[in-house]
Amino acid sequence: MTAAVSSSGALPPRRPTMKDVAAHAGVALKTVSRVVNGEPGVGPSTLARVEESIVALGYRRNESARQLRSGRAGTLAMVVRDIADPFFAAIGRAVEMAAHRDGQVVMIGSTHEDPAREREVALAFCARRPDALILAPIADSQEYLHPEVAAGLPVVAIDRPAHDLLADSVLSDNAGGVRSAVDHLVRHGHRRIGYLGDDEMVFTARERVMAYRAALRDNEIVTDEALIRLAAPTAGGIQRSLDELLGPGPVPGALAGSGPVTALITANNRITAEVLRQLPSLPSRPALVGFDDLELADLITPGLTVVAQDAEGIGRAAMELLESRLADPALPAREVRIPTRLIIRGSAE
Amino acid sequence: MTAAVSSSGALPPRRPTMKDVAAHAGVALKTVSRVVNGEPGVGPSTLARVEESIVALGYRRNESARQLRSGRAGTLAMVVRDIADPFFAAIGRAVEMAAHRDGQVVMIGSTHEDPAREREVALAFCARRPDALILAPIADSQEYLHPEVAAGLPVVAIDRPAHDLLADSVLSDNAGGVRSAVDHLVRHGHRRIGYLGDDEMVFTARERVMAYRAALRDNEIVTDEALIRLAAPTAGGIQRSLDELLGPGPVPGALAGSGPVTALITANNRITAEVLRQLPSLPSRPALVGFDDLELADLITPGLTVVAQDAEGIGRAAMELLESRLADPALPAREVRIPTRLIIRGSAE
DNA sequence: TTTGCCCTAGACAACGTTGTCTGATCACAG
DNA sequence: CTGTGATCAGACAACGTTGTCTAGGGCAAA
């Protein structure tokens, strides 16, 4: 009676433990552990009795305690720029699927491009002692992870390499991607190709614009630095760039005797989207190749040609690197490049 | 010498614990605990010494042990249909941001519309004893969560309600959204409005199509059941529906004396995208309103009018429900409806 | 100088598991 | 009927924390 009242009352509900199950089934604690873990050495009748008790009490193993005792976490940590960014969401999905196959669970967090937050979130994850950490670095240095790596935590950097840290990395083949974009445009007869990229502070932005210059050179086109605009993407800045590159007058600072650009490479999603937005109101309509695929890019008319990153491939490669490093922690830092894919939609003019 | 060799060798690297820090600083274990937790009762000189040792050894608190001892998890679990789905990604971001403010960390997993996997993932999360669970139900019953809820785990269902479970839920105002779509089309003179929805097995699909019928009634339009197509979205099925609804002949089974539809409501993202894809090849071009916003819908020409769900609002509301339930676990199950927003782009013809 | 008190620091147990080791039970062969 | 080995079950310690309780030491008041 009293028990019934107190259990239905507002008393702090306590979860049943192995001890409770053991008492209920009339066996030893360790026997319950054996049953729960499917270990051999439990007779059929005992097994049945314990399983009944488990169901009857609604027992679930406490993974925290298990981790503490055994060291196995069964948890993966992933820190990206923004989990709602389709690129990282796709990577996250690939990681989650692979993790699920391995019976692992994924913690995920966003840095929102804030270095301090990267550190904060990554360390909060590490405090949970995950089996591995996947990190899209944003801070200048990942030195703060030294103790973790020294203690054997495998770290994989994605999208950009880590700094001051022994970590594998999985990066897109930025150079190959830009080269395929340039080649595509050149094949379609373009020689005045503008380039709108992100601030050169950003690793991928640097790689991409360097590849742009190299690809022009290989196509025997003289790089006109006035056609390159590198800045954090803002609507205003992009509009100004477009005006200058496509306007009727000569491009400010351009090489003598040259006209407006006939084609544009936009080096990331946000820039591409903004250019598409402003496209209708532009004086001329350049051919366009965007780096990063856009959701539903196939619905835009005319179709948008893009250099698509293989988010799934990146996620899978990261998981593979983690597994091999877990198997052999002494491995040197490795860098994997995941190929991009030129998706040709519509024409290049 | 031997120690140096073994520590640089392949020996299992052990993380320093509070015990190690205590030994290094020459204080008691509990004193280290006090320092780590910012508890009072530690003299300034002791404090400094301990802090030095913490840095020197690269000590980080083991959150598993802390959770085991104190019961506080600092972890939130979230199970959605697909973390790469923009709708759930946006909810996830909102949840993660709120959680971060509360010093919490988020575990996230996908069901991929598989009921068995929902159970599997949710229980794997629960084994980590999170402070709360946010779940986008896909299974017919969430009965399997009974022991968790009984033990005090606050559960919030999002997108669809949970079944056989005491849980709060945060749902979109599906009825209001569809009603605004119908009203919008009627305002623009449409009276033959087709409806492409998901299978009626799906909760949201049911709510939406019922609202469609009700809205027609309120606009004094007789519902023509032949204009309603409910099925899991496949390219083939949608094409067939479009052919029948928009083709030159009478719509099969339609009320007598009626022509093709002049407008379409597409009740979810996938259907909307598929219709947009087929739009160019259709015999006539209906006005279109989609349920769910599409990334970059503003770039599609002509602009696509949509009923946008407030993913961020859903995420925030879920967090608020969790907090209030944590404060008072005896609360009855509550249901919150988050308003949708009609985003008018382009014309309705 | 002594008494009493507060402030700081440490000892100890416990959280829920699992790994190791020992003990009990039973079938069967000698 | 006893000895042997295999099989199953249990006792105990430990994982890294934190909460509770107690001991030491210095300072103020008497």
Image: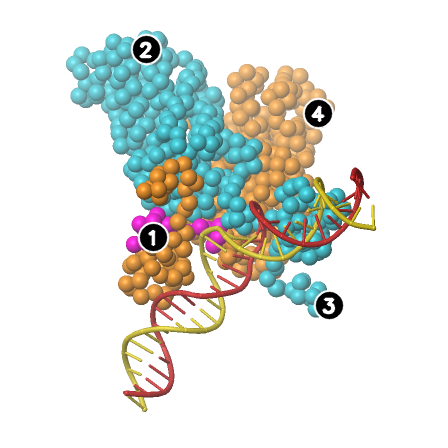
Chain colours: A cyan, B orange, C red, D yellow
Left or right: where B77 falls relative to C26: left
> What percent of the width, then of the height, locates residue A64?
53, 49
Q: Is residue A263 magenta?
A: no
User: For this rendering, which residue is in front, B342 or B21?
Assistant: B21
Closest to the camera, between mark 1 and mark 2, is 1
Q: CA distance from mark 3 to mark 2?
A: 85 Å
Q: Residues within 10 Å of mark 4 (few under 14, many from 20)?
A: some
Give the number of the disc on residue B54. Answer: 1
Which image quarter: residue A129? top left
Q: Residues within 10 Å of mark 1 (few under 14, many from 20)?
A: many
> The disc labelled 4 sits on which kind of residue?
Ala
Do the residues marked 3 and 4 share a common chain?
no
Q: CA distance from mark 3 to mark 4?
A: 65 Å
Question: In this rendering, is residue B175 above or below B29?
Answer: above
Question: In this rendering, is residue B343 above or below B24?
Answer: above
Q: Residues within 10 Å of mark 3 (few under 14, many from 20)?
A: few
Q: Which residue is mark 2?
A: A186
Give the number of the disc on residue A1. Answer: 3
> The disc labelled 1 sits on which kind of residue?
Ile
Question: In this rendering, is residue B8 above or below B37?
Answer: above
Point out the stretch of residues depicted in magenta.
Answer: B52-66
Indicate which disc, 1 or 4, sits on the residue closer to the N terminus: 1
